[in-house]
Amino acid sequence: MKTPLQIEFQQKALPTRLTSLAWVMIGAGAALAVAAWYVDGPRAAFNNVVMFMMLASIGIGSLFLISLEYVAGAVWSTPMRRVSEILAFIIPVTGVAALPMFLNLHDLFHWTHAEAVEADAILKGKSPYLNVTFFGIRFVATFAIWYLFYHFITRNSRKQDSTGDQLFTRRNIRLSAIFIPVFAVTVTFLAIDWIMSLEPHWFSTIFGVYYFSGTMLAALAAATIAIILLHENGYFGTLLRRDHFYSLGALMFAFVNFWAYIAFSQYLLIWYANLPEETFWMTRRWEGGWEFLSLALIVVHFVVPYVGLLAQEAKMNPRRLKIMAIWILFAHFIDLYWLVMPTHHESFFFGWMEVGFPLLSVGIVLLVFILRYRKTSLIPTGDPKLKRGLDFRL
């Protein structure tokens, strides 16, 4: 029996051609990835790190957005929250995507070589943290914790659809308040373990925040693309308006600026201090052709989305938002590539081996979305904030 808080919503099925498209992308991407592993295992391993961190950004970033809504008591995002709930299911899939890398840790991480650690005082000093056993424990613990929070938060949200009980909202507020500091710690571990420790002599105290800023942009962009495509094809009916799109655009614009601020702060501190143990990492990205990607990153990740989202009208235009969201996801991939690949090769490179992994990523995200969409109502019909969210005005 429905309570007065609940709203009737008839969900449409997604077209079957989307499933076919997802499987084609997965098949083509997997074929290229397997070929890359066969031809050049170390190069494929580094590409796998980029794919893994990309998927992790969308998955855990989506769960953070859900938690942020509950803790902040936001209402504008409530009608669209289920999109992030669906995307957050990428978290367990991301854990599986890391398995090939665990079989190639020696190709990725210099600190996994015992003889190198014995001969290097810095690596020996970091060995209590950088060792294979503790590395594996952190990985398993991180993804187990993330999945547990995902499971309980989304389960409460779905249960509320049938009962309309506000108790589930209160439970999720408490869970979200616990999750946010846990997220801050674990996402920092993830960034340090899988990217920063690729060059274990280098360190940056702001690196976890740097990865977080890109993660939020990726999660927001993925959600924005899905929301607008669903809206354009009538899956939300007439529930969403320009005010909702403006809030999505404004949040993306804010994190574009936040990413630029953190990126510049990290660079400025390294440049100003001019310490050899810090500058070598940045110097490597200004040599061998990588300097062109470094300059392109400024334009791609900041200038273009900044200009594209600056105007108020741009933030309310679904077509503009969709284009900018796709661009931001591309920019996040370039950012991760720039962070990871110079460790593998001193000179810039990009070939067919680099194509399969992002193609596989897009196929995985699309298939996960389709499968979870079939089992989840697109609108949280029992949420007590839904009516206010639908009536939201700027």
Image: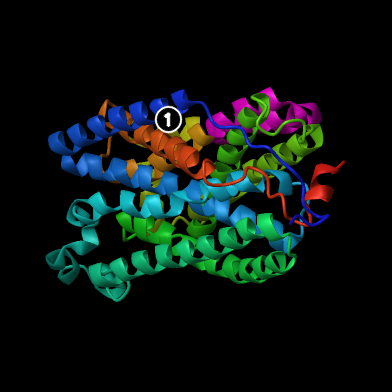
Does dot 1 land on a helix, a strand or a loop? helix
Residue 303 inside the magenta-drawn segment: yes
Q: Which stretch is magenta?
A: 300-328
Instruction: Name the residue rendered at 30%, 44% in the picture.
Output: 48
- 185 vs 324, left or right, is left
Q: Quadrant of the N terminus?
A: bottom right
Does residue 216 appear anywhere in the picture?
no
The residue nearer to you, when weighing 140 against 307, is 140
Residue under circle 1?
Answer: 19
Q: From what the image shows, is residue 79 above or below residue 113?
A: above
Residue 332 inside the magenta-drawn segment: no
Q: Position of residue 211 (x, y in %)?
A: 50, 52
Q: Position of residue 353 (x, y in %)?
A: 26, 31
Instruction: Name the residue rendered at 62%, 53% in the picture.
Output: 65
- 126 vs 64, left or right, is left
Instruction: Name the residue rendered at 41%, 62% in the picture.
Output: 143
Q: Position of residue 259 (x, y in %)?
A: 59, 46
Instruction: Name the residue rendered at 32%, 52% in the picture.
Output: 96
The residue type indicated by label 1 comes to: Thr
